[in-house]
Amino acid sequence: MVWISIAIFFGGIIWQVFRFLALSSTVDEPKLKRPAGLAKEEPPAGAGGLLYALKLSIFKTSPGMIIVTSVFHLCLIVVPLFLLGHNILIERAIGFSLFSFSEKTSDTLTVIFLLCGLFFLYRRLFVERVRIITSGTDYLMLLLATAPFITGFLAYHQLFDYKLMIVLHILAGEAMLILAPFTKFVHMVFFFAVRFTVKGEWALGSGNRNW
């Protein structure tokens, strides 16, 4: 089931990339004549260019939300990849594993991730502008993202029945892998594709594509 889940995940991601390319098209730069004496504003190079792009992005209007979101997504990726238990299983399966965090570090990052998840739940329940656009699917997606961490945390600390928790942990992780390319989780692909290749108000790069 794990290998099937991984195959569906990567196959779905590849399909979504081709779908994005099919739904978007390159944009021809308009050839407008610049008035004499009017210099073209160029973003600064290097780190300054990144800061310039961030100021033009949503980071300017909601830095707190961006920070929590970034921490949430970072933990969502790095904790499963560098978890000691996962890497032991990977090494047994293919004879190779990635660097592993200490168990204390992974445990701390899991708690931070779950706190971020509670923050998102709080916003959907109590922040009116968020609540009115929230559907049952949004709650399901949040549950699906946090379930592998909740069950893994409970299994690691041997709270409740260990065998039940570890089975739920495995099933939750496989469900997330299978559904990720075909649900709202696909924003993990479209975020980078859109932000860096599509021209727009929130773009982080000089993209040349449009919907």
Image (tube, helix red, strand yellow):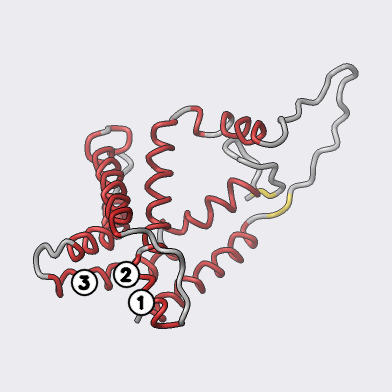
Q: Earlier in the sequence, mark 3 or mark 2?
A: 2
At label 1, which amino acid type do we have?
Leu
Q: Residues within 10 Å of mark 3 (few under 14, many from 20)?
A: some
Left or right: 110, with 194 as reference point: left
State which mark lies toward you, 3 or 1: 1
Q: Which residue is mark 3?
A: 166
The secondary structure type at the circle numbered 1 is helix
For marks 3 and 2, give the CA distance.
12 Å
Viewer-side residue, 156 vs 39: 156
User: Type of residue at label 2?
Assistant: Gly
Front one among 186 and 115: 115
Residue at label 1? 89
Of circles 3 and 2, which is in front?
2
Answer with the quarter of the image where residue 21 lies: bottom right
Residues marked 1 and 2 touching at CB (< 8 Å): yes
Q: In x, y percent, where is residue 173? A: 32, 68
Please indicate whether residue 83 sits to the left or right of residue 124 in the image: right
Q: Residue furthest top?
A: 37
Q: Residue at x 86, y 25 (%)?
A: 34
Residue 205 at x, y = what percent? 66, 42
Asked if residue 134 is positioned above or below residue 76 in the image, the reply reads above
Q: Could you tell whether 54 is left or right of 76 in the image?
A: right
